[in-house]
Image (tube, helix red, strand yellow):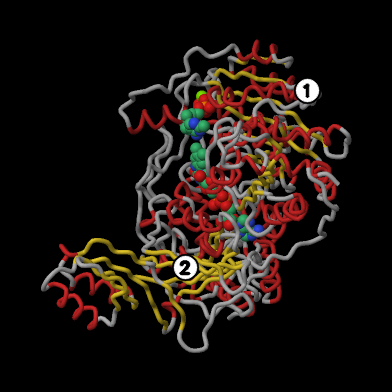
Amino acid sequence: MRGAEIFVQALKDEGVEYIFGYPGGAVLHIYDELFKQDAVKHILVRHEQGATHAADGYSRATGKPGVVLVTSGPGATNCVTGIATAYMDSIPMVVFTGQVPTHLIGNDAFQEVDAIGITRPCVKHNFLVEKVEDLAPTIKKAFYIAASGRPGPVVVDIPKDVTADSCDYYYPKSIEMRSYKPTGRGHPGQIRKAIQLIFEAKKPMVYTGGGIVLDDAAEELTEFGHLTGFPITNTLMGLGGYPATDPQFVGMLGMHGTYEANMAMHHCDVLIAIGARFDDRVTGNLEKFCPYAKIVHVDVDPSSISKNVPVDVPIVGSAREVLREMNQLLREAEFKALDKSRPWWRQITEWSALDCLRYDRTTDVIKPQYVIEELYAVTGGDAYITSDVGQHQMWAAQYYKFDKPRRWINSGGLGTMGFGLPAALGVQLGFPDSIVCCVTGEASLVMCIQELSTALQYNLPVKIINLNNRYMGMVRQWQEFFYDRRYSHSYMDALPDFVKLAEAFGHVGLRIEHARDVRTALKEAMGMKDRLVMMDFLTDQTENVYPMIASGKGHHEMHLAPGNPQPQPSDRELA
Amino acid sequence: MRHILSILLENHAGALSRVAGLFSARAFNIESLTVAPTEDPTVSRMTLVTSGSDEIVEQIVKQLNKLIDVIKLIDLNDGPHIERELMLVKVLARDGGREEIKRLVDIFRGRIIDVTDTTYVVELTGASHKLDAFIEAVNGELIMEVVRTGVSGIARGTRALNVGTPTAAPRSPTKAAKSGDRAARGTVNPAHLL
Ligand SMILES: Cc1cc2nc3c(=O)[nH]c(=O)nc-3n(C[C@H](O)[C@H](O)[C@H](O)COP(=O)(O)OP(=O)(O)OC[C@H]3O[C@@H](n4cnc5c(N)ncnc54)[C@H](O)[C@@H]3O)c2cc1C
Ligand SMILES: Cc1ncc(C[n+]2csc(CCOP(=O)(O)OP(=O)(O)O)c2C)c(N)n1
Ligand SMILES: [Mg+2]
């Protein structure tokens, strides 16, 4: 079989449904094979960055690895941002890059780049396929590595001659690697130690992250929550891992987390962290992080544990497996769930009463928070929401209450503007009958705007919620707070007419200028089931994201929105 | 503190750059690094000398283990071990100085392996600090060139690192390492390691 045929057959055997790509010289043999079949559906994007984000969005929503195919040179370099985005959020993805023929490698040949070298720091692993015999086994390994353990992107660089050469086809069913053996079950002794701490805790707190979503452990976490009765917070990446409407959920934590979540973090005596990596946006000042707590950390990646914060009970293992075992032990021990009438919960309820996400609901200027609340109402809380990066991302995270995992799709670790639209296309392909919305800002949106054509070509009726504040709002907010309101280059001048822009791409555009029109517009848009609708909401230009922990501050030193009573930071240990 | 890590890695093109790239990307120290194939041509052995606090070295070990091409590694500082480095030094050796250098070479148990009217090449093996001491002892103006191989090391006694045997008992500088979390890779199930 020829290499190009082997390639396509291997994808079929791997069960790949969609491949996001863009052709070019080095991959033309492969494109010729793709043409001859329709089991693997190729989605033609308009820029290779779009391919990576679309594959990434598809993966985040479906749990299956996203697959990308691009040509050598500029095709490969255009993928780097998308690969790094997936890498930072541990998203399984396999990216195939074409390469110049083996005899030309190193020659500065036409469209040659060292794709392996360029992507090495932002992949879980990468491979150069040196001969056709290696092609099928390498593809198998790539999918195995991408999806197992702590997931991540894998790049496979395929020289053109490898796709022309022939050999027998054999696709291994499974793979054993002596140098890679991810851990599954946690160490029983360590799990018992964690249970012991759970029993002793008076002010417990559960902090979970993307690992719950990646490991499909939301059910187990919910059971754990109910067995213990403990308060639970999620990171930005972990939203939906625990139902946001559950009474034990205290909201997101960290820089823009809720008052109650951050205060509970600061004052807890036992912290149970699962599938979260103590990112600096979450911990704030490490010196002030959880000063009174003994910390349990469950993570599949040993290098996540004790990286930023030393922990007391490390447990290496899959979140789901470890949660199952902990749940089992708690049931056996007939653990009595922490009651809401206990002092710790009463304290948390008091913090919650501050209502830190309050905003002005009386004006007719469109408040961005209001758009998200209405979006939540109109979609019954059941939509897939992708986002870009900025204030709109934070508002979506704060005001859309995600009850299910894999519904909230955003770039947390790299913070990649331009992610939202292509990611939404990937999600919609995975769930053609669901409502998929992209919450974006006018600056982020135009970074991958060309993908509106892809949406038209494949009839992907994504709903774009453009919270248009005519500013790089997040940048403006920092300039307001920390640079004496010198708004250096954060005003978005010369913006396109987004309605006409949508129309020019063959879609529907709506402009909404008053709060009173928000709901109607959203309903109208959701009603157009088979059309992509771009909603251009002209929002309050100067709205800021609150609460906020400024850098160098601790969880107990939050800034609340003006008009709220600013709580006095208290650093004493609670009784 | 200084640590000597002994690493078995797949003998693949690019494996070395993964290790080197890891150190530069994460701002870890490398004092020296040597690498060569082993008796099994599919496996390379790397000896890497690094330094840092216990927490940093623990993170270095975890990050190295995370590299897909790394099969196994041990920290030789976890137990008694032997460390050797080879050094070649070209020195100016003229007139009365010739005797002086020869004496020094004898004291350090080195060998003179090339002689001209005006120069010697001295070969010296030993732990790095011994080589340092020799350099210190020679008048700096006489040194023309110094070539060092970097450190090789091996554990004393029965402890050995090879592809077939389970990883040796984990080093335990911090709470995390004590609990065995860094044993997540290797030919044995880490659950059985503790
Ligand atoms: C503008 C902006 C503002 C932000 N503000 C905030 C904020 O206020 N609050 C906030 O929380 N974040 C915020 N972030 C996001 C932040 O940068 C990080 O991306 C995020 O906090 C990381 O989430 P996480 O800890 O859940 O880790 P993830 O990146 O989701 O990592 C997952 C962790 O789970 C582990 N894991 C993976 N698979 C498994 C498994 N099977 N079993 C067990 N463990 C597993 C991984 O090893 C890793 O440690 C912001 C980002 C942006 C762009
Ligand atoms: C590719 C990229 N460039 C720059 C940044 C830095 N950045 C973070 S938020 C932001 C502004 C985003 O503006 P907009 O999309 O309008 O969202 P808003 O904050 O106004 O809601 C910028 C420039 C980034 N995250 N990504
Ligand atoms: Mg904006």
How many other residues sit within 10 Å of disc 1, few (<14), some (14-19) or many (≥20)? few
Quarter holding residue B88: bottom left
Please indicate whether residue A274 sits to the left or right of residue A258 in the image: right
Residue A55, position in %: x, y?
A: 70, 39
Determine contact: label 2, label 1, CB under 8 Å.
Answer: no
Q: In front of the other: label 2 or label 1? A: 1
Q: Chain of mark 1?
A: A
Q: Quadrant of the C terminus of chain A?
A: bottom left
Quarter holding residue A24: top right
Q: Amino acid at mark 2?
A: Lys
Q: Residue at x 36, y 57 (%)?
A: A287
Please determine whether, in this image, residue A157 is positioned above or below residue A274: above
Q: Secondary structure at mark 1?
A: helix
Q: Earlier in the sequence, mark 2 or mark 1?
A: 2
Residue B119, position in %: x, y?
A: 22, 66
Q: Residue at x 73, y 25 (%)?
A: A454
Please determine whether, in this image, residue A458 is positioned above or below residue A188: above
The residue that mark 1 highlights is A457
The residue that mark 2 highlights is A294
Q: Residue at x 52, y 48 (%)?
A: A121
Residue A570, position in %: x, y?
A: 35, 53
Q: Amino acid at mark 1?
A: Gln
> Residue A374 bears which disc, if any?
none
How many other residues sit within 10 Å of disc 2, few (<14), some (14-19) or many (≥20)? some
Q: Nearer the viewer, residue B65 or B4?
A: B4
Please indicate whether residue B56 sits to the left or right of residue B192 in the image: left
Report whether residue A252 is seen.
Answer: no
Residue A7, position in %: x, y?
A: 79, 44
Report whether residue A478 is seen.
Answer: yes
